[in-house]
Image (cartoon, coloured by chain):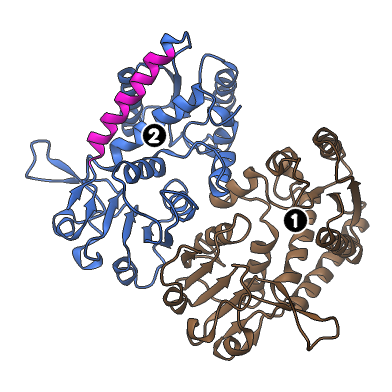
Chain colours: A brown, B blue
Amino acid sequence: MILLDGKKVSSLIKDEIAREVVKMKGSGLKVPHLAAMIAGSDGASETYVAHKGKACDQVGFKSTLVRLEEDVPEKVLFDKIDEINENTDIDGLIVQLPLPSHISEKKVVERIRVEKDVDGFHPVNVGRLLIDQPCYISATPNGIIELIKRYNIETSGKHCVILGRSNIVGKPMAMLMARKGNPGNATVTICHSRTGDIEAVCRQADILIVAMGKAEFVTAGMVKENAVVIDVGITRVESDKTKSGWKLLGDVKYDEVAPKCSYITPVPGGVGPMTIVSLLNNTLKAAKKEIYR
Amino acid sequence: MILLDGKKVSSLIKDEIAREVVKMKGSGLKVPHLAAMIAGSDGASETYVAHKGKACDQVGFKSTLVRLEEDVPEKVLFDKIDEINENTDIDGLIVQLPLPSHISEKKVVERIRVEKDVDGFHPVNVGRLLIDQPCYISATPNGIIELIKRYNIETSGKHCVILGRSNIVGKPMAMLMARKGNPGNATVTICHSRTGDIEAVCRQADILIVAMGKAEFVTAGMVKENAVVIDVGITRVESDKTKSGWKLLGDVKYDEVAPKCSYITPVPGGVGPMTIVSLLNNTLKAAKKEIYR
């Protein structure tokens, strides 16, 4: 069993990006610049945004945090987005979700210029992903694809089963695994809460990608010998065995599943760290205008 | 075995649309107006465009055909698109594909205003389909969904196997069958040329949607008893049994598969006629501004 070590790989990729930034500076180019917007003060959102800012620092990107009040009028937030859209020094803009309930996420996502949408949530980027055109791929699917690439995992002709049909993981992941290319060319099955015998479907998987948000849902009996298992889930549960009083669990019962796998991601330290480097990678692409113009 | 009679259903829907147009006229509204653009004189394209124009006539839509030379400069074609984009009398615009090789299909598709993209090929419409937001769904997937609805075929919890991963059938179809809703909520498997044991996967299908473009690819041995089979394929082959000297074949070996099915589409007269009513439906929605504004 080989560990898909997202922590190690993401650190490797950060080094690559940092070297690229040094090179850009050397050529007299401006460094990539990511702006993040946060409205209100949700605890988890604060943590995510702080992590993203820190990652920018690590690779030498410039970053800007735009902080708005919980009760910010939609119009003010839109104006701020427009301002960043027009700001030629800023390459990428992310608006941390969830937003306060009086603000339309859909409108916000569509307001960000597609060229700066490094989260890959704008319909144009999602649509281009489906029709296999250059686009910003959202962080989690992008991170998983990168892990698969770095470990040279064969996907062509394999049966990839995806648990979960979310807009940001399950559905884009299915499109990426099914498309022509490498990684890709897999036979893909999408399962979800309405799937009948989900255990039986899982047992067919050469590659099992789990994004249900249900702690330890996948047990050893659901996994084929030598399968590749990629666990996107992360749930915080109480624990009397840690100093903090809690621990993080994935959607896979790691201890019993891991021995059967050819490859498996740990939680934490698997897919999680890969998502932030996806964002950095998209921001780098934006700065270099690799996708749009 | 029940025939999924696309010819009958499409005629029914045309009547419904025609009544709606009469109502719109009665309320003093303008009638829906579809513009079609064709460059060059490909035989099949001519036929398709003529069919679409005739369908518009049948339901009382206005239609405009813009005919351009095979060697039309890209700029001239773009200007024509821009002109129609600005024309408030025209609700929908389709550009018949394939285009002459010197013209970028991608640029053409992205040039059409998303509000008038009744073919549903613009990345915004494709992206919205993936994230389950109101959009113009392209003709074939839309037609299949409509057939499933009209025959009240249960899809929730069923295993839907899709053969083919094209941008205009396989991939959007997978998203529609997997999404929350009715039709929808199916476990979906996408197969393609790289799929290993495609026969075995097919035999698992409660609903089998075939869009390979390989005449009579699906045989009786690949179909589960009581499956629903939807055949998107249409191939013209020589025949000494018809006056014309040719006949049309689907991707399914109809004669041997049909007896095993609960429902099956014939070819021709199944999915085909449904695609044109999808286009009419999208144009109606455009005229009523149901999707955008």
- The residue nearer to you, when weighing A95 against B92, is A95
The residues tagged by marks 1 and 2 sit, at their Cα atoms, a distance apart of 37 Å
Give, as a three-letter code, the residue at label 1: Asn
> In the structure shown, which secondary structural element does the residue marked by tag 1 occupy?
helix
Q: Could you say which disc has been placed on residue B211 in the image?
A: none
Residue A70 lies, in percent from the top left, at 86, 46
Majority secondary structure of magenta residues: helix
Residue B58 lies, in percent from the top left, at 30, 19
Residue B62 lies, in percent from the top left, at 41, 15
> A106 above or below B74?
below
Quadrant of the rendered image containing residue A142 = bottom right
The residue at 46%/62% (across/down) is: A194
> A105 above or below A132?
above
Give the quadrant of the N terminus of chain A: bottom right
The residue at 78%/70% (across/down) is: A13
Q: Which residues are magenta?
A: B5-24
Question: Is the Cβ of the residue at disc 1 closer than 8 Å to that at disc 2?
Answer: no
Label 1: chain?
Answer: A
Q: Is residue B156 left or right of residue A86?
A: left
Q: Is residue B271 left or right of residue A26?
A: left
> B265 above or below B203?
above
- The residue nearer to you, when weighing B52 against A112, is A112
Give, as a three-letter code, the residue at label 2: Ser
The residue at 55%/51% (across/down) is: A130
- The residue nearer to you, when weighing B205 against A103, is A103
Residue B112 visible in image: no
Residue A287 lies, in percent from the top left, at 81, 50
Q: Could you say which disc has been placed on residue B278 in the image?
A: 2
Is-magenta flag for residue B10?
yes
Residue highlighted by disc 1 = A282
> In the structure shown, which secondary structural element does the residue marked by tag 2 occupy?
helix
Q: Is residue A145 left or right of residue B182?
A: right
